[in-house]
Amino acid sequence: MNTPFGNSITTAEHAITLMLALARQIPQADASTQAGKWEKNRFMGVEITNKTLGIIGCGNIGSIVANRAIGLKMKVIAYDPFLAPERAAELGVEKVDLAELLRRADFVTLHTPLTDKTKGIIDGKAITAMKKGVRIINCARGGLVDEGALRAALDSGHVAGAAFDVFTEEPATKNPLFGHPNVVCTPHLGAATTEAQENVALQIAEQMSDYLLRGAISNAVNFPSITAEEAPRLRPFIELAEKLGSFAGQLTETGIHKAQLSYEGGVAGMNTKALTSAAIAGLLRPMLQEVNVVSAPVVAKERGIVIEEMTRAAAGDYDSLITLTVATERQTRSVSGTVFADGRPRIVNIKGIRMDAEFGRSMIYITNLDKPGFIGHFSSTLGDAGINIATFHVGRDAPGGNAIALIEIDGDVQQARPLKF
């Protein structure tokens, strides 16, 4: 079990503390004063009132930072692909894309997990796009910021200051940021308060007590809340639900408004709550890799994503069918799957187009118009690149109309982004 949110307030407060210390050069002024100097004119700071704070990642901790910053009379803008506009309005923040955040923010603070998509999100190019005099705070994860590029921007004066609690390599005994006069560093103190340690200790004790005395499971990191009797029947459908979510998540680049799960036939009588959790985990994991089947519904709720379930006991073309429909800012996409007698999950419908494909370890998904020669040309392209096709599944809505293909390949495609299962 884990203890989510036990140290959220502490981490958010540390980010605000670093921002204030950075704005007024508190550590540097303290060191100077205690050294017997009186350099009153040296440490000219800036106010944070009416300044624009750009938050990258507005989940649990980011939303707390936003709340505190608004209380300090700052203008708060946020970049988070999973933050629904309604949730942004509720928080009192303006949702923007990353380019706009970089262009407008006086202070930038990061509160996102380290994933393939977020690694190096603040690189040299992003720093160049920021306004001159920006200040950057990172209390999230090392690796989100290119520390070498940031040091160069500090040296040139483009970035006025930086405050970091996390680093690419920890323990950090050396780092490009160390030694710069406009940098504040702390040794990963985000959760280091008495209250946070007490909160997580009490929470885990209560959870273990509930499990040992009543069999209740909460915040388990690797097990949904299901009974021993239903587990054998449910297991292959949990795998199916998670892979359907992963399929949709890897194709989703914009903010998600709603995720709808439809269960038809025999699966409608199972524990659909566990299935929905698995699907939402798969949907969010491409962007938020630390999400699991237990935390996914909570994370989705934080970002204002509406989750709906529909059940229909009557079976259609399949004994059991799960359909995931994802509505984003730009489009609505659906994908359906089932479990055959062999226990293996399969995709049977994408965007209303029928097909029948197993989930491979690495797959390429294509949409195209149904025209002669396309499949042959594409297969030759893969062959010329030395990529071997394991399976090739196609479907179309009408002759000459919209077509799709799912191609399982051996190995990975290095210059594209194949689906991973």
Image (cartoon, rainbow, N blue to C red):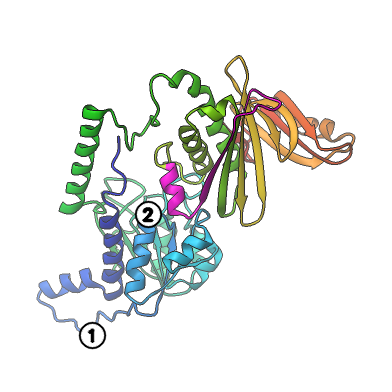
Q: SS of the residue at dot 2?
A: helix
> Is residue 314 shown in magenta?
yes
Q: Position of residue 157 (x, y in %)?
A: 41, 73
**Over which residues does the magenta segment extend?**
296-320
Task: Give coordinates of residue 362: x percent, y percent.
Answer: 61, 30
Tell me, for residue 376, which label it has, or none. none
Pick the front one: 141 or 254: 254
Label 1: state its secondary structure. Answer: loop
Q: Earlier in the sequence, mark 2 or mark 1?
A: 1
> Which residue is depicted at the point 46% across and 18% down?
232
Disc 2 target residue: 60
Q: Looking at numbered disc 1 in the image, what kind of residue is underneath it?
A: Asn
Q: In which quarter of the image is the C terminus?
A: top right
Residue 313 shown in magenta: yes
Residue under the point 30% across and 53% down: 8
Residue 359 is left or right of residue 54, and the answer is right
Q: Among all residues in the image, which is located at the extreme bottom?
A: 41
